Image (cartoon, rainbow, N blue to C red):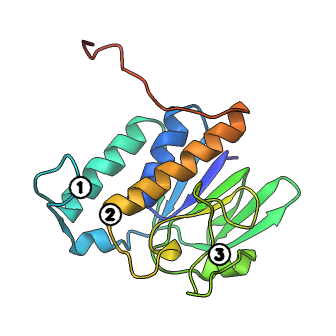
Amino acid sequence: MPDVAVVGGGPAGLSAALFTAKNGLDTTVFDTGETWMSMAHLFNYLGIRSISGEEFMNVARGQATDRGVTINDDEAVTGVEVDSDGFAVTTADGEYEADYVVLATGDNTDLAADLGCAFTDEDVVDVAVTMETSVEDAYATGAMVRTGEYEAIISAGDGGAAALNVLSKEEGEHFHDFDTPEDVPTL
């Protein structure tokens, strides 16, 4: 059973998964491969001068799997429900249980609506600054929470915010993800 189920393998989903997995939570990403990044070229993403969306996604997926993320390719989530143990995540291949769910499905809000998440007057998922929805331990990220804002860097930040809140809940205090790998020289 994954601790964190991430629905969507774009920048928001992979960012959330990277943070939770590298900090010890069993994390599974359900990815259909249908991300807007396949049509993108990044030249306004901080730290990257110029990279195709596909190349960026390959790097991001590699970074996430290097940190322990399980990516279930071509496994579309058909339902998410609250159950006695957290969440039941349903796909054509089976049902998974998770303590937390992160919705990172672009502007598709169907799963959030089915889960019973509150929406704003602008018809986007209503979230706190932590990206948590009105359903406890369910998070929504990226375009589904922002009217007309389709930016990879914003989505990645939303995913990171969701992950840090999950990690804060797990630790029982504010969690900070500042670390230096042993093989990196410090000043």
Sequence-wise first label, 2 or 3: 3
Identify the element where label 3 is drawn.
helix
Residue 17 percent location from the top left of the image: 50, 48
Measured in 3D between alpha carbons, the distance from the residue under mark 1 to the one under mark 2, in whole angstroms, is: 10 Å
Sequence-wise first label, 1 or 2: 1
Can residue 126 be seen here? yes
Residue located 48% across and 32% down the image: 177
The residue furthest right is 84
Residue 145 percent location from the top left of the image: 52, 73
Name the quadrant containing residue 187.
top left
Report which residue position mark 2 lands on.
152
- Vertical order, 176 against 130 (above or below): above
Identify the element where label 1 is drawn.
helix
Report which residue position mark 1 lands on.
56
Residue 181 percent location from the top left of the image: 36, 19
Give the residue type that dot 1 points to. Answer: Phe
Measured in 3D between alpha carbons, the distance from the residue under mark 2 to the one under mark 3, in whole angstroms, is: 20 Å
Report which residue position mark 3 lands on.
112
